[in-house]
Image (cartoon, rainbow, N blue to C red):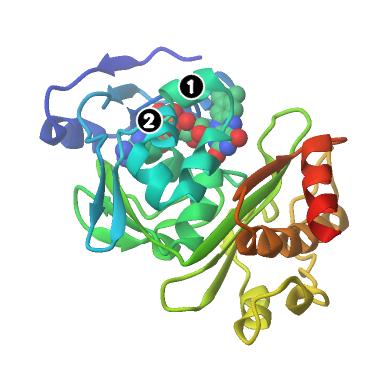
Amino acid sequence: MRDFLYYHPRSLDEARRLGAEDGALLLAGGQTLLRDMKLGRHSPTSLIDITGLLPNQIEARDGAIWIGAGATHAEVAAAPLLRQQLPVLASLVAHIGDPAVRNRGTLGGAIAANEPAGDYPAACLALGGTVHTTERDVRSDEFLAGNCRTVLKPGEIVKAVTFQLPKKAAYIKFLNPAARYAMVGVFVCIANDGKPHVAVTGARDNGAFRWTEAEKALTSHFGEESVGDIHLPLGGLIEDLFADAEYRAHLAEVLTKRAVCLALADTPQVVALSHGSRAGLEYFQHNAA
Ligand SMILES: Cc1cc2nc3c(=O)[nH]c(=O)nc-3n(C[C@H](O)[C@H](O)[C@H](O)COP(=O)(O)OP(=O)(O)OC[C@H]3O[C@@H](n4cnc5c(N)ncnc54)[C@H](O)[C@@H]3O)c2cc1C
């Protein structure tokens, strides 16, 4: 790791000014950034620590849920309001990484990092999320601009994200056996206007995306049989040591069907499956019977 200057500003304005300087990077929980610095993916000349400067409240606002960008994954997972009104999101966040990651990692960092297998980007896309920054409000489908990219400008800071409340929702991810990120994750919901939304993460190089073909198929009837014959095109799918494009496409197709079943069931709303995972298999066998 190269040497860098460390600043811990006292105000968001100071953080914006320092963050806009050449070679500066904002530091929140450090769960993505410090790893990337160790791997040589980033070599900032200064780190601007924004911990303590951002809101971490979780509030119901205008029929939606507003979450401050400083909220850690552990805070979001445990929030009573969220567990009551948007349990799928609380549960999705409870399945991010491990307790150490969840106690440091923040909503703002996860959205700004926009990792290709991140869970929050899929939730944001499916739940019609709006990202509130120090400069503007941006719809999440405009904000998330491809693999580890967003439309944030230098010094611009994510302050909060608003998630729309769906009528029904579920998220299912198949874990990468080494990293425990989603090899593929599918978030399915029926939005408040009755339209189906399907967001997939972990599958494409370009990050999470709305699978419009699956959404079209679910429009006339929201049931697993509606998505029985759709296929995810192989172009642009991630191929690595763990899975080739065909495998990831197949996972996306199977998980979409299962997420639709899950959204229609009472509980649970989030399932994380790993190789040989009995809990997940038993859940689906029981419900298919
Ligand atoms: C072992 C491990 C397992 C993980 N597993 C998962 C997983 O299963 N699913 C998953 O989704 N994620 C996973 N993560 C990533 C985790 O969710 C991170 O917490 C998150 O991606 C980054 O949040 P952070 O607050 O740590 O941000 P940081 O690492 O501090 O920052 C990440 C990036 O965002 C920028 N940034 C941070 N905050 C803001 C802000 N408010 N405004 C503008 N820019 C900002 C930083 O400059 C940096 O570029 C894992 C991480 C680790 C280390």
Q: CA distance from mark 1 to mark 2?
A: 21 Å
Left or right of residue 170, residue 77 in this image: left
Q: Which numbered disc flags the more N-terminal residue, 1 or 2?
A: 1
Quadrant of the image occupied by residue 233: bottom right
Left or right of residue 282, residue 48 in this image: left
On the image, the x and y values in percent for residue 195 come to 51, 78
Residue located at (80% from left, 48% from top): 239
User: Quick one: 228 or 27, which is closer to the camera?
Assistant: 228
> Which marked residue is nearer to the observer: mark 1 or mark 2?
2
Q: Please name the amino acid that badge 2 sits on.
A: Glu
Observer able to see residue 40: no
Label 2 C-beta lies within 8 Å of the nearest ligand 1 atom: no
Looking at the figure, which quarter contains the C terminus?
bottom right
Q: Please name the amino acid that badge 1 sits on.
A: Leu
Residue located at (83% from left, 43% from top): 282
On the image, the x and y values in percent for residue 58 come to 28, 42
User: Quick one: 47 or 119, which is closer to the camera?
Assistant: 119
Residue labelled with disc 1: 34
Numbered tag placed on residue 19 in the rendering: none
Q: Secondary structure at mark 1?
A: helix
On the image, the x and y values in percent for residue 168 come to 52, 64
Residue located at (19% from left, 47% from top): 134
Observer able to see residue 211: yes
Residue labelled with disc 2: 75
Label 1 C-beta lies within 8 Å of the nearest ligand 1 atom: yes
On the image, the x and y values in percent for residue 178 come to 76, 28
Q: Classify 10 Å Cα crowding around label 1: few (below 14), some (14-19), many (20 and above).
A: some
Is mark 1 in CB contact (under 8 Å) with mark 2?
Answer: no
